[in-house]
Amino acid sequence: MRFKNKVALITAGGNGIGRATAKIMVSEGATVIVADNHQGHLDEAVPSLKEAAGKSGGKVLGEQIDALDPQQVEKLIARTAQDHGAIDILVNAVGGSTVIANPQATTEQLSFADWQKLIAFNLDATFLCTHTIIPVMKKKRSGKIVNLASIAGRGLSFNSSSAYAAAKGGIIAFTRKLAFELGPDGINVNAIAPSITLTERIRPHWDKRSQASQAEEIERTPLRRVAEAADQANVICFLASSDADFVTGLTIDVTGGV
């Protein structure tokens, strides 16, 4: 089991890609702290994840937290490190484009408030959690940090705003820079760049699209389907495991070939 005796903190772990990642890790022996700002997500996810742990020895703890509140983040990371002795893995899964009313808004249509909201929700949350956990990982001289970017950050913004693209491009650059900073301390920093992924939050938006629009999305994907959360979680877990000990600064496109 790849995550036996490992402690993982997953933000936005109560749903979507974060939850799918937690499911794999706990089933392979990890103690997973599932942090989410929606108590309802936690109430649904934690019992299911405990069941997924089976006889692996994995454990699940749910924590309601706002990943944009420095005090809440600091308290959670300090308490987790004290209770478990270390935090081996951080998955920054907070993010997304649907926190504004029109995720496909053009730059002309975007308000400054919506621009700020998307930058904060995606880039600021990733910075804050990473910034806070660095001293904990440095103390042990090891750790794995995995960030969630997007192919929008590569400029492939078919159905997202420029603000979302800018935030995710920032995560790609942030990941690369951090790898240089933290490599000497034994800390690996990588990211994934998903294409559209049918999580609980995205599926309603997908279902509202016309059949022609859905078909166009699938047609431009060489593997001829849209990603599921597990597709992204599998790559995150590779990057968080010892299999990726000599991989750092990399953003892997998980897109079906787009």
Image: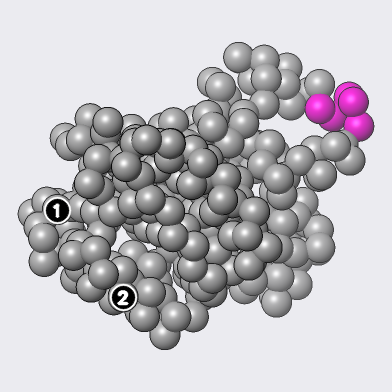
Q: Residues within 10 Å of mark 1 (few under 14, many from 20)?
A: many
Instruction: Give the CA separation, mark 2 to mark 1.
Output: 19 Å
**In this view of the protein, which residue sits in the foreground, 99 or 107?**
99
Q: Residue at x 11, y 66 (%)?
A: 139
Characterize the magenta stretch by its predominant secondary structure.
helix
Label 1: which residue?
A: 142
Question: Circle 2: is it few (<14), some (14-19), or many (20+) Cα within 10 Å?
Answer: few
The reply to whether residue 236 is in sight is no
Which residue is disc 2 drawn over?
Answer: 79
Q: In front: mark 2 or mark 1?
A: 2
Viewer-side residue, 104 vs 144: 144
Residue at x-position 34% and y-position 36%? 56
Circle 1: residue type = Ser
Q: Is residue 175 left or right of residue 226?
A: left
What is the span of residues highlighted in magenta in the rendered image? 210-214
Could you tell me the amino acid type at mark 2? Arg
Position above or below: 201 against 140: above
Q: What quarter of the picture does the C terminus occupy?
A: top right
The chosen color scheme is: one colour
Q: Is residue 212 left or right of residue 103?
A: right
Location of residue 211 (image quadrant)? top right
Q: Is residue 206 magenta?
A: no
- Residue 78 seen in render: yes
Residue 175: x, y in percent?
Answer: 33, 52
Element class at badge 2:
helix
Task: Please state, as top left, top right, bottom left or bottom right, where the N terminus lies in the image.
Answer: top left
Residue sitting at the far front: 55
Is residue 211 one of those drawn in magenta? Answer: yes
Establish if 3 lies above or below 40.
above
Give the x, y percent position of residue 249: 27, 44
Q: Residue furthest bottom?
A: 71
Tell me where residue 155 appears, x and y as whole percent.
56, 42
